[in-house]
Image: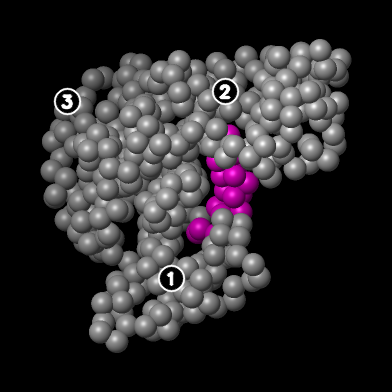
Amino acid sequence: MALIYVDDLQAGMVLASDLQTPKGRFILAAGAALQPEHLKILKSWGVYEADIEESSLSEEYHKQQEQSAAFVDLAEGYLLRRLVLNDLEQEPLITIYRDAVRRCTSRLQSGWEPVVISSNQAQPEMEPAYLNPVQVVNGEIELFALPDVYSRIVETLNSPSATSQRVAEVISKDASLTLRLLELVNSPVYGFAGKIESIPRAVTLLGTNELKTLALGVSTVQQFRTIPNDVLDMESFWKHSIRCGLFAQVLAGHIEGVSEEKCFVGGLLHDIGRLLLLKQNPELYGQVMQMGRKKQSSMYQVEKEYLRTDHALVGKLLAGKWKLPISLTRMIGGHHAPSASQYQLEACLVHVADVLAHICGDEAIMVNEIPQLQIKAWEELNLATDVLGSTIRQVDAEYLKIVGIFPQPTIP
């Protein structure tokens, strides 16, 4: 038998084993021949591959595989280089890598050229510096203050006379925020029946706390969009952040009792500490980035080596200064080292989402190397690897619709 990806399935192929959804729902029995109507709806059921009898594979299928073989080699070479810090011989990385190769192969065939960041091996070794994370957070008071509109929402919610209507009124006074929030809640991410045309209606459907959290994410992105592009490609940075938020949200949908809105914003803001380090110390951070490229290491580890701190800790301190919910603080502070947070669920979830966003993104962020996935963090989520294929496809589809909602960076 052969394991065939859903996009390569053809009518007439015969199932070698029963076909089920990721949640175990029976679809077709072994021995059944796939029909055109099956191919149209398999993705909507979350199916991303099927066991097929090799004797039923057509000459057309074999010809297509031969044509794509060179692109598969290129995809594997590119991904193996980026995933050098990860063990690809254990789950869930086996499944993630297999899906990533397929996606990368398809993009290469369509003309996509992967981004590879060059390194200057002659770069002289830099002396480690020491950045006090508390001083970093306290340094840029004006730029890194809590967004005004979010502060007003929190103040309203803490008032004895707080009502959902009053919260809606506060949000509605910010025309830009209102527009983007309505675009977000009307997106396929939420799938509400009918168009939501007002903030009061959005509050009714989502709840005040959930909409407050989304307001934090949207208003924060707006606040940081003017950071200089000299050292960090801000467009790529925000694209990665949005994709991480979507992965966190979709994965949260498979875990009972976890807020999908909080996970989306946690993923969106997970690297916010990096912006503080970049804004306050652009030259120093640029040198650290060069060391990361030279050493072929993840930026998180290089930060710890040369700055004696890291962007996750800085982001955690900022979240504490802003008095954000503890769940968001855990996501931001623990997304690279959930073990330091005793493998709290929120930190584990954004950690996995961050790695997935790096693997599935079209852009390399600062260095080529993708951070190491902590297997225990994945195990803490208690999810089956079967959900990964459908999760990646869902994020691919939703990303294209969501990325335009957020303001693009303005380069000073």
- Name which quarter of the figure residue 132 lies in: top left
Tell me the quarter of the picture where residue 74 sits.
top right
Q: Secondary structure at mark 1?
A: loop
Residue closest to the eye, 294 or 361: 361
> Residue 314: where, in percent of width, then height?
22, 46
Q: Residue furthest bottom?
A: 161
At a point 31% along the width and 77% down the height, the residue shown is 157
Dot 1 or dot 2: first in sequence order is 2
CA–CA distance in space, label 1 to label 2: 39 Å
Horizontal side, residue 343 vs residue 240: left or right:
left
- How many numbered circles are shown? 3
Residue drawn at (86%, 15%) of the image = 59
Q: Are marks 1 and 3 in contact (CB under 8 Å)?
A: no
Q: Earlier in the sequence, mark 3 or mark 2?
A: 2
Contact? badges 3 and 2 (CB < 8 Å): no
Return the residue nearer the eye: 190 or 25.
25
Q: Residues within 10 Å of mark 3 (few under 14, many from 20)?
A: few
The magenta region covers 389-407
The amino acid type of the residue labelled 2 equals Arg
Answer left or right for 113 relative to 178: right
Distance of mark 1 from mark 3, alpha carbons? 50 Å
Foreground: disc 1 or disc 3: 1
- Characterize the local packing of mark 1: few (<14), some (14-19) or many (20 or more) Cα atoms within 10 angstroms: few
Q: Which residue is mark 3?
A: 127
Between the residue at mark 3 and the residue at mark 2, the CA separation in whole angstroms equals 40 Å
* Residue 314 visible somewhere in the drawing: yes
Q: Position of residue 212 (x, y in %)?
A: 38, 68
In the rendered image of this protein, does residue 141 appear above or below residue 89? Answer: below
Q: Which mark is residue 207?
A: 1
Q: Is residue 33 above or below residue 135?
A: above
Name the kind of residue labelled 1 in the image.
Answer: Gly
Q: Nearer the viewer, mark 1 or mark 2?
A: 1
